[in-house]
Amino acid sequence: MKLNEKIDVVKDILANKKVAIGFSGGADSTLLAYLSSQVSKDTLAITIDNHLLPINFIDNTKEIAKTYNIKHEIIDLDFYNEEEFLKNTSERCFNCRDLMYTTIKRVARDNGFDFICDGNNISDLVNNRPGILITYRENFKTPFIKAKLTSKEIHEYLDKNNISYSKSTTCLATRIQTDTSLSKKNIERIKYCEDYILTNTNCKIVKLRNIGEFGICEVDNPKEIMKDGKFKQINDELKSNGFKKIALNLTPIDDNEYISLDYVGGSFKYKLPFTINLKKTLHKLGNEIIFKSNKKIKLEKITIYSNGLIKGENFKSYDEALDKFMDVLSKLRRNV
């Protein structure tokens, strides 16, 4: 499908419903709010303030919701009171979404909104984002996954239609390596340092990874950091805030995620960065299954392996293979 056709699929899903959206003001939830404001019966954007968000996060969500004249609820949910989350285990993002989505669901229902959705898109399903399991468990609708929209396509549509969105929305806990406990002091230091870089450069996206005593700067335009002595200025400021060494990742941040298959002669292989729960996946595939074992599920043209490997064969074109792969992605159930 072409991009506009996919957008029409989303509009059809949202049309004439009372739509509640988990709302961060980022690209995905902004596009969802924009489209819902055009076609739904009513729209409620629900934002969780977990106290671990970039500077101006909440103000940005308010501004975007006001732009599209939609209802907006901001819920205070202080994650510093959540001991399990502060342990910062490998299940951190799963625990985060668990806390947030159960709250969003309650607020939506309390306000009379029964169609609750989020901005997950199809390219999220090939990345290591275990929070998607909470989306499934809480039965949040995923219009972008249904329409097979990738992050790259969402950004393309937003840019083409001059729709503004926030480029800095991810929880600051993601900057700290797992199995390192989270503290307010460290989160506030990262928040200040990222804002300092944004304020003193023309970068639009900044993430400061904290690994022990080291700070690793990731930005959308590394050249901005290197010119006019800015690296020394930033290096000195970040060191004055407690980092012993600062490094710059020379690979630009690129949020334009998409899905590309290694397709040769009608076949492809794709290795997902997580393992598959075959038992739960079986229930989603139903009568599509030709063969199953404790290591794999075989469909007509697709074989799903428990280790995350997906194989396809006997396709007539790349587009057919990609479309079938995307169909299967939405039915997979991964392990945490």
Image (cartoon, rainbow, N blue to C red):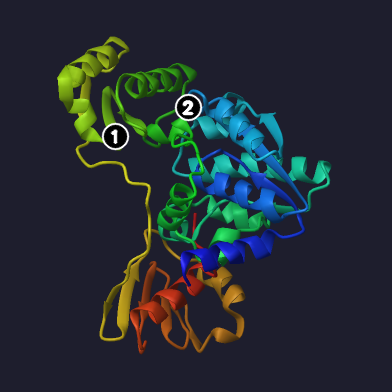
Residue drawn 38% across and 78% down?
Answer: 319
Residue tagged by mark 2?
54
Q: Secondary structure at mark 1?
A: strand
Residue drawn 25% across and 18% down?
Answer: 234
What amino acid type is highlighted by mark number 2?
A: Pro
The residues tagged by marks 1 and 2 sit, at their Cα atoms, a distance apart of 15 Å
Residue drawn 45% across and 30% down?
Answer: 172
In this view, the residue in front, 285 or 29, is 29
For residue 231, the mark is none
In this view, the residue in front, 86 or 260, is 260
The residue lying furthest to the front in this view is 161
x and y percentages locating residue 37 in the rendered image: 68, 48
For residue 218, the mark is 1
Residue 223 quadrant:
top left
What amino acid type is highlighted by mark number 1?
A: Glu
Q: Name the N-terminal-most of marks 1 and 2.
A: 2
x and y percentages locating residue 299 in the rendered image: 47, 85
